[in-house]
Image (cartoon, rainbow, N blue to C red):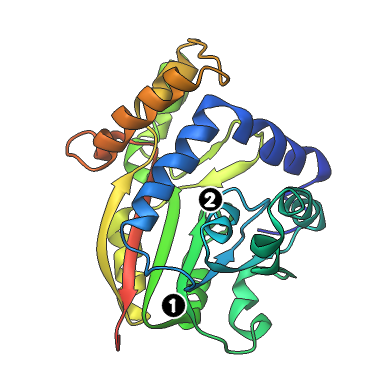
Amino acid sequence: MGENTWSDLVATAFADDAYTSVKGAVRTQVMHRQLTAHLPPPPATVLDVGGGAGHQSLPLAAAGYEVTLLDPSPVMLEKARERLARLPGPARERVSLLAADGERAADTVAGRRFDAVLCHGVLGYLEAPGPLVEQLCRCAAPGGLVSIMTGNAHTMAVRPALERRWADALAAFDSRTEIGVLGVRGRADTVEELEDLLRAGGVEPLGWYGVWLFVDWLEFAGVHVDPADREQVAAIVEVEAQAAARDPYRRLSRVFHLLGRRGGG
């Protein structure tokens, strides 16, 4: 995920706009629940690879975790600094920001191993997932958690169909790539493929979740939910959290969240 991909305009849209939407809030809250169900207690160490503005990992710092956020984009790192400045002093002291590509993560952290390694929304912007997944596994300590969120290759036809782009939907059944809502081409993977890559890196898959289902469909159907309506957002989170862990619902999610644990713990 290079700097050319994350231009100033795209980075701003992602950090400022996407996460202020209902969909962004649902993603953050649902994944936080999924993560904390598997994370060791604080002050465990967390490496967030391609962590962007820190929407997923800075709340972990506020909860007591020691967080290292790594991202190649100066714009995204500046957004992370802005959000970090709003945390209480003790939480700010638990966060380190590093400028580097995820495919050089192990060298960038000088061989340090972490209790949890996160990589959310990054693999889809790479030509192939293997090199980055290998780095994630290398950075995990024995017994450490690896957390990956990426596009679901089995549901590529969902978005164009909900947008009534029928020709695109037909083509998407046999495609792994699409132009996403940010105008950037993305690529999708399957749970099974990434599980194989984790095992090759010495990480045993623990299980996987969906992330968005109904809230995604609402957005593409043109139904607006006010992000300021906390009661409505909380209700959506409860429904999405249930769908994320149940078949067949989770299999229909356009993205999935895969977790694994490194051996030796």
> Residue at 37% of width from left, 45% of height from top?
153
Q: Is 11 displayed left or right of 229 in the figure?
A: right
> Residue at 35% of width from left, 63% of height from top?
194
Q: Is 146 displayed left or right of 68 in the figure?
A: left
> Residue at 29% of width from left, 34% of height from top?
252
In front here: 244 or 155? 244
Q: Amino acid at mark 2?
A: Gly
Q: Is residue 166 above or below residue 45?
A: above
Give coordinates of residue 92: x percent, y percent.
70, 62
Earlier along the polypeptide chain: callout 2 or callout 1?
A: 2
Residue extending furthest left?
247
- Residue wearing tag 2: 121
In front here: 42 or 227? 42
Give coordinates of residue 57: x percent, y percent.
56, 57
**Marks 2 and 1 close (CB-CB < 8 Å):** no
Q: Amino acid at mark 1?
A: Cys
Label annotation for residue 137? 1
> Residue at 31% of width from left, 37% of height from top?
241
Give coordinates of residue 160: x percent, y percent.
46, 23
Q: Is residue 77 above or below residue 105?
A: above
In front here: 199 or 87? 87
